[in-house]
Amino acid sequence: MDQLLIEATSSTPKIYLDKESSKFEIIGKSFPEESRVFYSPVYVWLEEYAQNPNEETLFEFKMEYFNSSSSLIILEILNILDSIKKNGGKVTILWSHLTIDEDMLEAGEEYSELVSLPFEYKALEDFN
């Protein structure tokens, strides 16, 4: 399975999904003009990955900001990951946020109530 790499722009996050190295991350800001179009390759990749996932999947969200349409997309991504767990896979969400950004921490906590996935929270001083 090929890796998926989408470089960050001023309005879209970096997305790196690689089954071989077990690296799954979305980093940055997400307020694309058309969220569904931007995230379409992510859905396709994750749906394929869900057919034959790694024994363990640690998926990291390291978001600085996301708008409401991206919020719905994040939930859909979490639902795909939740289906992997429901089919016997081990999936953990690492929700990284800036120490000073309590809103982003709360967003992660709200997502954790909507899916059956375990969430780990990591406070960072900066994203570098």
Image: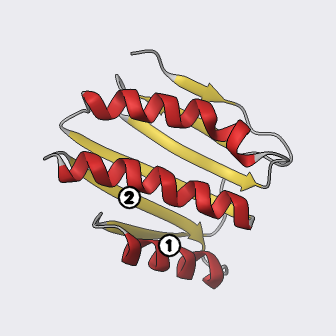
Name the quadrant containing residue 22: top left
Q: CA distance from mark 2 to mark 1?
A: 9 Å
Quarter where residue 36 is shown: top right
Query: At 72% across and 32% down in the image, what residue appears?
Result: 7
How far across and how far down the image is residue 56, in percent? 22, 42
Left or right: 112, with 4 as reference point: left
- Counting from the top left corner in percent of width and height, residue 121 is at 43, 71
Whether residue 65 is visible to the viewer of this picture, yes or no, is no
Residue 84: x and y, percent?
26, 45
Secondary element at tag 2: strand
Q: Looking at numbered disc 1 in the image, what kind of residue is underneath it?
A: Gly
Image mark for residue 72: none
Marks 2 and 1 in Cβ contact (< 8 Å): yes
- Which residue is identified by label 1? 108
Residue at 74% across / 55% down in the picture?
Answer: 29
Disc 1: CA contacts within 10 A as few (<14), some (14-19) or many (>=20): many
Vertical side of 122 occupied by 46: above or below: above
Query: What's the mark number on residue 93?
Result: 2
Q: Is residue 63 visible?
A: yes
Residue displayed at 52% across by 64% down:
96
Relative to 76, 125 lies left or right:
right
Establish if 22 lies above or below 10.
above
